[in-house]
Structure formats: structure tokens, C-alpha cells
Amino acid sequence: MNIEQARFNMIEQQIRPWDVLDLNVLALLAMVRREDFVPAAYQALAFVDCEVPLGHGQVMLTPKVEARLLQEAQVQRHERVLEIGAGSGFMAALLAHRAQSVITLEKLPALAQLATANLRRAGVLNASVREMDGSRGLSGDGPFDVIMLSGSVPEVPQALLDQLKPGGRLLAIVGQEPVMHGVRITRLSATALQSQDLFDTVAPRLSGFDEPSRFSF
């Protein structure tokens, strides 16, 4: 496989058509080696329009969804980012190239170790992995400019929204199969939030996010 041709095709045929037109994001996707964050058994899927299995029911999101979330986060160099769901560490690496610092939380020990090793190997120095349940965020280190949920949730916990700075953005995939939406929630002030649906997609649940009860009493 010609890796650079495959990377080019991924960007031009999958990512651009999904309204990812920010030239800085596209340049970053051309630079950060996605294949270095894909498990060895799935190297052939590194640039394919599919989710890559990571084990334990978790996946790398499709390249186009990763790219769209990154674009819509609009991360700036001075900003601090919290990611929920480190996975293989790829999204943390992308975020770290745009942000001042990134903390990524991963509940599953094997994935926390994988992400840590991948980030270290890639020379990413401003992203750290913490092995913990991310569903309540990291209030002791907040508030954050950007919170990125790298997987789907039934609904966004209030605890995470409370850790957004004014002007801060939270990106997540929210809903129940077969209807989920990529959303951006912006904190306008101490008391006001604005939510915007960005795109339709479906993604596996992040570990640690419970389904809402279907019963009422």
C-alpha cells in the first residue's frame, strides 16, 4: 500500500466531502500519522471509511467524523482541552497540535496504556492520559476551553457542561441508535448554553456512560 496516497485519498474522498474545509485541519490530518495509532491487526483499515476496533467494545471513529469534530471544536493555541475517551490516543494527538494542553481520560486500563504509548511514540508532549471514568469530567483541573467526547453518549452529563469556560465548546455524538447527532454546545455565559446539531451519524457508546431509564413511575 502506498501510505501517502492512501492518506491523500482519505482526505480528498472521505473528509473534504463531509464539509471539512478548514485548511489547517486538513493540513494537520495530512501530517499526523493515523496509521501509528491503529492497532497492528487493523493496519489495513487505517485510512478506510470505517470504525477501527480497539477491543473492549471501543473503536476509533471514522476519519470523517474525527475530522468534523476537530474542525467544529475550533481549538486555539492558548486553550486547554479535556477529552473523554482516549481510545488509541489519535484524537488527543490531533487536539494537542492545536491546543496549549490536552488531558484525555480513559476508563479502560488497556486503552489508557495504548494511548499513553502511542502519544509518547509520536512525540506528543502536551497531552497526558489519565486512567479514570470520564463521565464526570475532571472538575479539579477545570474549567476547560474545549471538551471533546470521542464516542457517543445518550445525553451530555451536566457535570461536563459545568466544566466549560464561558466561550467554551463541548463536542459530542448524542442520541440513541439509529438516530444520533454530532452536536456542539457552547457556553455563552455562566448561566446560558447554546446547542447546535452539526451532522447525523451513529457511533458506539463511550465506556462509563449509562443509558437513561426507559421506565417512568
Image (cartoon, grey):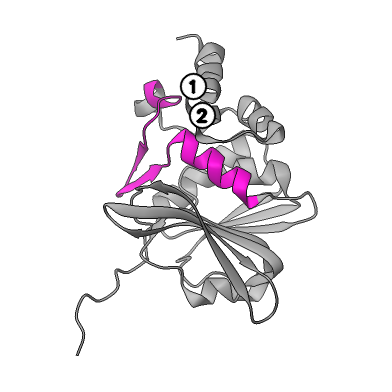
Q: Which residue shows up at 43% across the image and 60% down it? A: 107
User: In this rendering, does residue 110 appear at all?
Assistant: yes
* C-alpha separation, residue under disc 2 versus residue under disc 1: 7 Å
Neighbor class of circle 2 (other Cα within 10 Å; few <14, some 14-19, many 20+) is few
Residue 166 appears left or right of 186: right
What residue is pinned by disc 2? 17
Neighbor class of circle 1 (other Cα within 10 Å; few <14, some 14-19, many 20+) is few
The single residue placed furthest to the top in the displayed view is 2
SS for dot 2? helix
Q: Quadrant of the C terminus?
A: bottom left
Q: Which residue shows up at 66% across the image and 57% down it? A: 81
The single residue placed furthest to the right in the displayed view is 78
What residue is pinned by disc 1? 13
Q: Which mark is residue 100?
A: none
Check whether the beta carbons of the residues at disc 2 and disc 1 lie within 8 A of each other: yes
Magenta highlight on residue 49: yes
Report x, y in % for residue 158. 50, 77
